[in-house]
Amino acid sequence: MTKKSIALLLLILAANPLLAQNNKDSVETIFQFQRINTLGFRISPELQAGNLGGKFSMFYGGSAMLTLNRSISIGVAAFTTGRNIQDHRFGTPNRDNLNVHYGGLRVEYALNPQKKFHLTFPLLVGLGMARTDTTSSIQPNPFVRGRFDGPGSGNSRSFLVIQPGVHAEINLLPHLNLFAGVSYRIVGDAGHNRINLPAVDSPTLGQLQGLTVSAGLRLRFDFNVRRKNSH
């Protein structure tokens, strides 16, 4: 090996640490993995008004989520119409009873959550069930006020649900937020469609999806998990 080759090799070896340090400081990546500084949880009762058979109907529910760094939340959510909504909306001449329930995994990203006014982006992925029957099929229930749908007395359809949305949120108090926003419920066939009453129409997938508006309160608590430096 010539002296020139040896000198060039030594120059490359000497410059390599400097180049590596420079690349480490300047390279940006799509995913920046940050340390977890805070852990928290969110409990959010929520009201929704969404499309159901071509009409807006009320849904009641909420979510419970674990939060990382006050921005990323992961948990579960569930919503229901309650019992025995009576309506003609599915095309039958008589008023049918309708029950819809759905829920699943919910993830949410908060943009600048420390600001008084900020945005959050929730996404729900899960399963649901819609049941219809006639008013003559409901039976007295000694354990629940009012009446209920007798087991096996109606039609049922299961469905997949994906519901992305955007909420505007206000920090009212140190541990209490108010939010309102819109989302869109997208549904697909989950493979279960039971017909016990041929005279009663079951809701189609198109009748179960649509625009949803929502509002609710969020109870939030966050805890620092990183130790403070003693110096």
Image: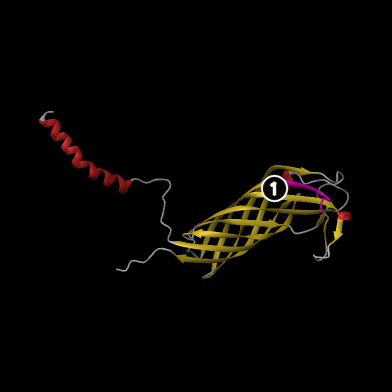
Q: Is 148 left, or right, of 65 in this rendering? A: right
Left or right of residue 40: residue 195:
right
Quadrant assignment, res 180: bottom right
Towards the viewer: 89 or 41: 41
Q: Toward the viewer: 221 or 203?
A: 221
Question: Furthest-left residue in view?
Answer: 3
Residue drawn where x is 34% and y is 45% of the image: 27
Q: Is residue 88 visible?
A: no
- Crowd band around label 1 with a 10 angstrom C-alpha radius: few (<14), some (14–19), many (20+): many
Q: Quadrant of the N terminus?
A: top left
In-front residue for pair 104/175:
104
The number of callouts visible is 1
Q: Is 40 covered by the magenta stretch?
A: no
Q: Nearer the viewer, residue 45 or 154?
A: 154
Relative to 202, 16 lies left or right: left
Left or right side of 224 for 146: right
- Circle 1 residue: 209
Secondary element under disc 1, as helix, strand or loop, is loop
Q: Is residue 180 above or below residue 174?
A: above
Q: Quadrant of the C terminus?
A: bottom left
Where residue 109 appears, as percent x and y from the top left, is 52, 55
Q: Residue at x 60, y 56 (%)?
A: 76
Q: Which residues are magenta?
A: 151-158
> Percent position (x, y) of residue 106?
59, 54
219 relative to 57, above or below = below
Colour scheme employed for the rendering of this structure? secondary structure
Residue extending farthest top: 1
x and y percentages locating residue 68 in the rendered image: 48, 58
**Identity of the residue furthest to the bottom in this view:** 173
- The amino acid sitting under disc 1 is Gln
